[in-house]
Image (cartoon, rainbow, N blue to C red):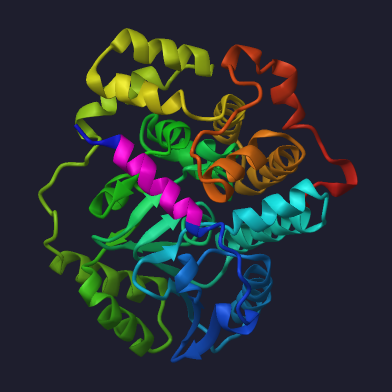
Amino acid sequence: MISRFNSFKRTHIILQHLGMSKHTDAAEEVLLERKGCAGVITLNRPKFLNALNLTMIQKIYPQLKKWEQDPETFMIIIKGVGGKAFCAGGDIREVSNAGKTKQKLAQDFFREEYTVNNAIDSCRKPYVALIHGITMGGGVGLSVHGQFRVATEKTLFAMPETAIGLFPDVGGGYFLPRLQGKLGYFLALTGFRLKGRDVLKAGIATHFVDSEKLDMLEEDLLALKSPSEEKIANVLETYQAKSKIDQDKPFILEEHMDKINSCFSANTVEQIIENLQQDGSSFALEQLKIINKMSPTSLKITLRQLLEGSSKTLREVLTMEYRMSQACMGGHDFHEGVRAVLIDKDQSPKWKPADLKDVTDEDVNTHFKSLGSNDLKF
């Protein structure tokens, strides 16, 4: 049995890193360089697990667009420094402070972040994300919409937002419901963490390489002459073929997939909970304990986000998620989640409403209402 309480605590430790917004020189928080035939984006806030802030997002977007137009740039590579994290998410404490005081940052951060997520998806140059180390929230948004996502044995993937009164954004409503069976629904509601080769087996990464070979892999990519998508894929596949780490281990959730598919196929959170209770296995009861800690409002809006997102385009999903983000900024649970996890660190958020049955359809609907002229537009 996978011990989830430890991982729950560890997620809180990671989230705490995201709350430490001390500004270093913004110029150095993200490095943008031309190397060989590639544009290379390096997230450079290792002390904060390369958490994304608005200034970083505002530097990445125009450069991405420039490289996309540049005939001399044949691919884009994104990576993080420090070895611990690719990018552990967005700088949520800063966003919460701004949201509480109605500052524009709370609008701008999500608007510009989602604009970058869409730009990665529509990028006409091959985009290679080296997702080594912790890859959560905003870090998922910087990688999962690109063509190539390279995981290592140190990759740790999660979307832990329901634990802080938010929802798995950055296009989670698009990519999560498209994973096998109901896996994405399970990951979204529980914040379950996938490690190493399991990130590939889940369909989140496209390739897997040994972490000690990452530098060589990057050198080989940069040495390619005017590389096509095919040449890049060949290099990645060659490295993957040589990787033996956990090669024969089954997917960590393989034995539970039937349960996940049946329990998480319901259209309401209440029914999912009932399914887990009726299942009664130790795995189901473990998930139940975890879900019961999450923000009831977050659980309900997340399930609706995924159900609706399953038939929308990424742009439509990001427009929907932008509406949701702004409703969360104006609500109670996100700020309370940030308080409990990042500020007071008591790990016991007081959700309002505290009970699923008190989260009304009207409460849920307000998260999906058009913002009129303030809607996210592409």
Could you tell whether 186 is left or right of 162 in the image? left
The correct choice, above or below, for 339 with respect to 2 in the image is below
Q: x%, y% of residue 170?
A: 58, 50
The C terminus is located in which quarter? bottom right
Secondary structure mainly formed by the magenta segment: helix
* Residue 237, x across and y down, in percent: 24, 67
Q: Is residue 7 above or below residue 49?
A: above
| Horizontal relation, residue 5 to residue 31: left or right | left
**Which of the 4 image quarters holds residue 168?**
top right
Q: Who's the residue at 49% across and 59% down the image?
A: 17
Is residue 267 something one can see in this rendering? no
* Residue occupying the point 64% across, 79% down: 26
The one of 356 and 235 positioned closer to us in this rendering: 356
Q: Is residue 102 left or right of residue 221?
A: right
Q: Is residue 71 left or right of residue 183?
A: right
Answer whether residue 12 is magenta in the image: yes
Residue 46 in percent (x, y) is at 45, 72
Residue range (magenta): 5-16
Q: Residue furthest top?
A: 278
* Residue depicted at 71% across the width and 45% down the height: 322
For residue 248: magenta?
no
Q: Is residue 215 above or below residue 133?
A: below
Residue 240 seen in the current view: yes
- Give whichever of 336, 365 is nearer the camera: 336
Q: How many marks?
A: 0
Residue at the image position 63 percent from the left and 38 percent from the top: 336
Q: Position of residue 35 (x, y in %)?
A: 46, 90
Task: Give the quadrant of residue 309.
Answer: top right
Considering only vertical position in the picture, is 305 above or below 96?
above
Question: Which corner quadrant holds the N terminus?
Answer: top left
